[in-house]
């Protein structure tokens, strides 16, 4: 963590990420008003001391809705990446560890089938079939996002299963599950964690896209993508409706990308060696 703070972009990403996490956790105390409260007399007001981010077409406070929207984005990002990572580790680990016909079925048939289908379109199809809702959205994005983690896990397991410490554990009588959990998994988690951090940025964009299409959480729940959908009819008479949720999405995605890049630079020995050579160490 000390090394991550030394990188300016990574430090910015960590600070932004902490801000969004605090917004999600403390939304009831940080929001100045009820995000679903309708005040038609105050509709489409520009930013002012009374409403720092202005109001939307129903008179709802945009700052409050942006703060509560962080909660939806953080829940979706962590849930989707967690489920997709778990599924990818299981299927990719099994395919890479055992190989043979198991690898053929899981990698050649199952993974390539999912890779051949556009992920976002597949998620739209799942949500359209299941209906809008938070957990339906999480399920759809998890089903379409596990393949990348599975392919990465498979490649890492293929390289690690022939290492000396794995052979030594197998010679001592350790079972497959113990070898995988105690010896292989800890040694392949570095690139997977980097992929997970960057994957959260993509998940936030996917959630915003589905919410913009009306396939996210149903109203009146605040969502950044749904706020952009509401704002598309007021691009010229109330541009603040687009600016603030758009900035929230951009900064949140940048935060995860900066964090992922910083983790990659610190966890990759080759990158650290190049950095030391460049610094003259």
Image (cartoon, rainbow, N blue to C red):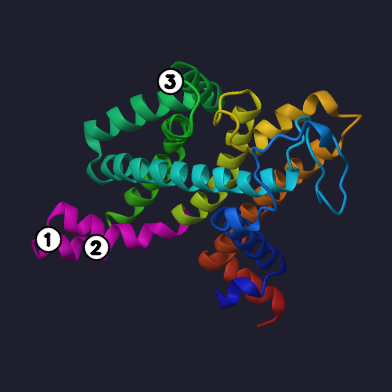
In this picture, residue 51 sits left or right of residue 208: right
Vertical comparison of 30 with 207: above or below: below
Q: How many numbered tags mark residues here?
A: 3
Q: Nearer the viewer, residue 111 or 145?
A: 145
Q: Disc 3 marks which residue?
A: 130
Q: Is residue 29 visible?
A: yes
Q: Quadrant of the N terminus?
A: bottom right
Find residue 61 and report its image quarter: top right
Residue 108 is labelled as none
Please rate how many residues cluster around mark 3, counting C-alpha atoms within 10 Å: few if below 14, some from 14 to 19, many from 20: some
Residue drawn at x 25%, y 39% is 99
Please rate how many residues cluster around mark 2, counting C-alpha atoms within 10 Å: few if below 14, some from 14 to 19, many from 20: few
Q: Nearer the viewer, residue 159 or 9?
A: 9
Residue drawn at x 80%, y 47% is 53
Report if residue 217 lies within the magenta region: no
* Of the two numbered discs 3 and 1 in the rendering, the one whose residue sits closer to the viewer: 3
Q: Disc 1 marks which residue?
A: 174
Give residue 74's position: percent from left, percent from top.
54, 48
Instruction: State which region is magenta.
Output: 164-191
Q: Disc 2 marks which residue?
A: 182
Q: Secondary structure at mark 1?
A: loop
Vertical comparison of 121 with 173: above or below: above
Q: Secondary structure at mark 2?
A: helix
Q: Nearer the viewer, residue 259 or 168?
A: 259
* Of the two numbered discs 2 and 3 in the rendering, the one whose residue sits closer to the viewer: 3
């Amino acid at each position: 963590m000390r090394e991550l703070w030394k990188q300016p972009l990574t430090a910015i990403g960590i600070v932004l990420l902490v801000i969004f996490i605090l917004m999600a956790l403390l939304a009831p105390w940080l929001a100045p008003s009820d995000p679903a409260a309708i005040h038609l007399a105050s509709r489409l007001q520009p930013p002012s001391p009374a409403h720092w981010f202005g109001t939307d077409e129903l008179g709802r406070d945009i700052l409050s809705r942006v703060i509560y929207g962080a909660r939806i984005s953080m829940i979706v990002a962590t849930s989707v990446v967690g489920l997709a990572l778990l599924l990818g580790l299981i299927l990719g680990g099994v395919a890479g560890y055992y190989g043979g016909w198991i690898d053929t079925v899981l990698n050649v048939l199952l993974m390539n089938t999912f890779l051949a289908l556009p992920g976002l379109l597949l998620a739209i199809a799942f949500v359209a079939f299941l209906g809008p809702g938070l957990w339906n959205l999480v399920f759809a994005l998890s089903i379409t996002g596990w393949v990348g983690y599975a392919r990465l896990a498979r490649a890492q397991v293929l390289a690690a299963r022939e290492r000396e410490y794995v052979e030594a554990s197998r010679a001592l009588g350790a079972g497959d599950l113990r070898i995988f959990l105690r010896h292989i998994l800890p040694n392949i988690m570095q690139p997977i964690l980097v992929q997970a951090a960057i994957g959260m940025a993509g998940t936030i964009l996917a959630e915003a896209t589905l919410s913009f299409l009306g396939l996210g959480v149903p109203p009146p729940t605040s969502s950044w993508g749904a706020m952009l959908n509401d704002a598309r009819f007021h691009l010229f008479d109330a541009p603040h409706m687009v600016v603030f949720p758009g900035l929230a999405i951009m900064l949140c995605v940048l935060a995860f990308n900066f964090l992922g890049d910083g983790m990659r630079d610190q966890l990759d020995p080759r990158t650290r060696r190049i950095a030391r050579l460049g610094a003259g160490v």
